[in-house]
């Protein structure tokens, strides 16, 4: 049953976001409000259900690219054929909603931006998951640790197939979690190994392209300055003329404490 929800308040104002807010910012704002205003947490408030329907309606519209465009152009009058009214339990918003939204190393990708991202020339490792999938939740802590481990080497993404079913169908995802490597000009590569951090790192590194640069007195300073400007870390191995090697060290030229 659909419940018609009307409000005189702007949807962006209801969620406390700007009209230029990203999808991630909209999800984060809605989740914060959902945990605070959900009827499960406000049993003595007779207006809790109606108030929650309003913010839920705002989120349903603003999270959808097409509905958001209609709303921006026509207001609520442009949404008369798309009425919502259903919402989940408080536990869903607490534990299942936006699993990776608070992880800066993991980019939640949506249909409108997915192809541009994975065809940008960067290497992507993407986790297609469903909020109701127990295996997806089991993987989440490892995926976060893995993302931190390889940060700067490749891009780590996540797609919520509960919110973006069309994208997942387009990519042939039919089980969760499904993990794929994407690179422009290359067919996606599905990961079939065990879900330990070590195995994920090993698999990802097989697809990372690296460049070896020989540093010497004539190019050292310029190379370091270029790396610093680009925020690139280098693994530098120092060797002697006799062929002996010292212990390699990773230099982060964005960190002035290593200078």
Image (cartoon, rainbow, N blue to C red):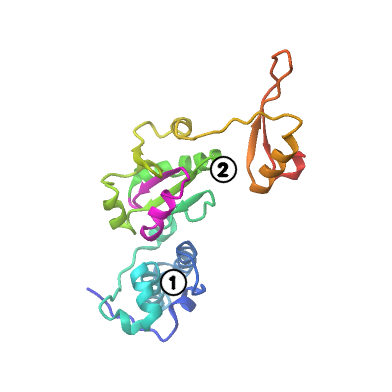
Residue 16 in the image: above or below residue 162: below
Residue 237 in the image: above or below residue 4: above
Query: In which image quadrant can residue 80 be found?
Result: bottom left
125 in magenta: yes
The residue where tag 2 is placed is 152
Q: Secondary structure at mark 2?
A: loop
Comparing 214 with 46, the one in front is 214
| Labelled disc at residue 19 | none
* Position of residue 175 in the picture relative to residue 24 (left or right): left
Comparing 236 with 148, the one in front is 236
| Labelled disc at residue 42 | 1
The Cα–Cα distance between marks 2 and 1, rounded to whole angstroms, is 43 Å
Q: Which span is picked out in magenta?
A: 109-132
For the question of whether residue 57 can be seen, the reply is no
44 in magenta: no
Residue drawn 33% across the image and 58% down it = 164
């Amino acid at each position: 049953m659909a419940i018609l929800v009307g409000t005189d308040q702007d949807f962006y104002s209801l969620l406390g976001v700007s009209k230029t807010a990203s999808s991630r910012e909209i999800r984060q704002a809605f989740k914060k409000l959902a945990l605070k205003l959900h009827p499960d947490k406000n049993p003595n408030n007779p207006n809790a259900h109606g108030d929650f329907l309003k913010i839920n309606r705002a989120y349903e519209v603003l999270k959808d690219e097409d509905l958001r465009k209609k709303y921006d152009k026509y207001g609520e009058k442009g949404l008369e054929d798309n009425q919502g009214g259903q919402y989940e339990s408080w536990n869903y918003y607490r534990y299942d909603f936006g699993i990776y939204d608070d992880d800066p190393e993991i980019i939640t990708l949506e249909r409108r931006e997915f192809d541009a991202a994975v065809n940008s020339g960067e290497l992507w490792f993407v986790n297609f998951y469903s909020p109701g999938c127990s295996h997806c939740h089991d993987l989440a802590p490892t995926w976060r640790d893995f993302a931190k481990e390889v940060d700067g080497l490749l891009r780590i993404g996540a797609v919520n197939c509960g919110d973006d079913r069309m994208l997942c169908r387009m990519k042939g995802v039919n089980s969760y979690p499904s993990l794929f490597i994407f690179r422009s000009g290359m067919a996606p590569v599905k990961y079939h190994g065990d879900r330990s951090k070590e195995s994920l790192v090993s698999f990802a590194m097989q697809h990372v392209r690296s460049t070896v640069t020989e540093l010497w007195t004539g190019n050292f300073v310029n190379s370091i300055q270029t790396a610093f400007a680009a925020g690139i870390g280098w693994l530098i191995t120092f060797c002697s003329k006799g062929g002996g090697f010292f212990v390699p060290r990773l230099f982060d030229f964005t960190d002035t404490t290593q200078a």
